[in-house]
Amino acid sequence: AMKLFSHEKIYFEKLVKCAMLSLSSAGGSDCGASVSSAFVGWVLQKDGIKQARKMYKRFLALPRPSLKFFQFCIELEANLAVGNNDGLVNARKLYDSAISIYPQERELWRKYYNMELTVGTSETSNAIYWRARKVLNDSTALDVPRS
């Protein structure tokens, strides 16, 4: 449907609105994340990162977006973060939004911290480390799990 309607902006927008209406009642399901991710990926390929950002922001504005969709958007921005300040800024905003909805997700905190270690500063990575310890109430919160 996206391929069929993508040539006609009016119809594509109606398709997006129908998807958003359906997803607003699904509230955070992995199935909804797949649909949202497909739209964002399509727009990214067709129109570029600026339009993809507009699209993912629309889906994130729906009630309780899924952690899986947040992770998709974060990965998209984190891939741009190396050498691109806009990507880093957007990835941080997405992590902060995801954490506000899913504060007890250790893996989310761990990935945020690792991103900051890789592309951030010691100050930003330390700030994430201490925030995670406080929110998770655990001194081992960001330790790598052992097999």
Image (spheres, helix red, strand yellow):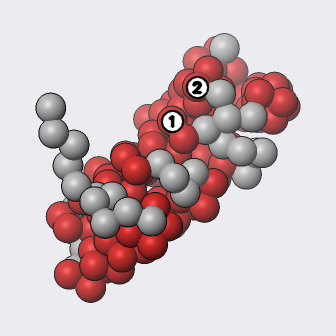
- Secondary structure state at the residue bearing disc 2: helix
Judging by the rendered image, the residue that carries numbered circle 2 is: 30
User: In the image, 51: left or right of 108?
Assistant: right
Residue density around tag 2, few if under 14, some if 14–19, many if 20 or more, within 10 Å: some
User: In the image, 129: left or right of 27?
Assistant: left
Q: Residue furthest bottom?
A: 123
Mark 1 / mark 2, whichever is N-terminal: 2
Residue that appears at 22% across and 80% down: 121
In this picture, is 66 found above or below 56?
above
Residue that appears at 75% across and 34% down: 27
| Residue 9 appearing in the image | yes
In this picture, is 30 found above or below 66?
above
Tell me whether the residue at label 1 lies in contact with that at label 2, contact meaning CB atoms closer than 8 angstroms: yes
Identity, as a three-letter code, of the amino acid under mark 2: Asp
User: In the image, 120: left or right of 40?
Assistant: left
Judging by the rendered image, the residue that carries numbered circle 1 is: 68
Of residues 48 and 135, the one nearer the viewer is: 135
| Residue 52 appearing in the image | no
Residue that appears at 22% across and 43% down: 145
User: In the image, 6: left or right of 87?
Assistant: right
Residue that appears at 27% across and 74% down: 125
Identity, as a three-letter code, of the amino acid under mark 1: Lys
Quadrant (top left, top right, bottom left, bottom right) of the N terminus: top right
Quadrant in the rendering for residue 117: bottom left
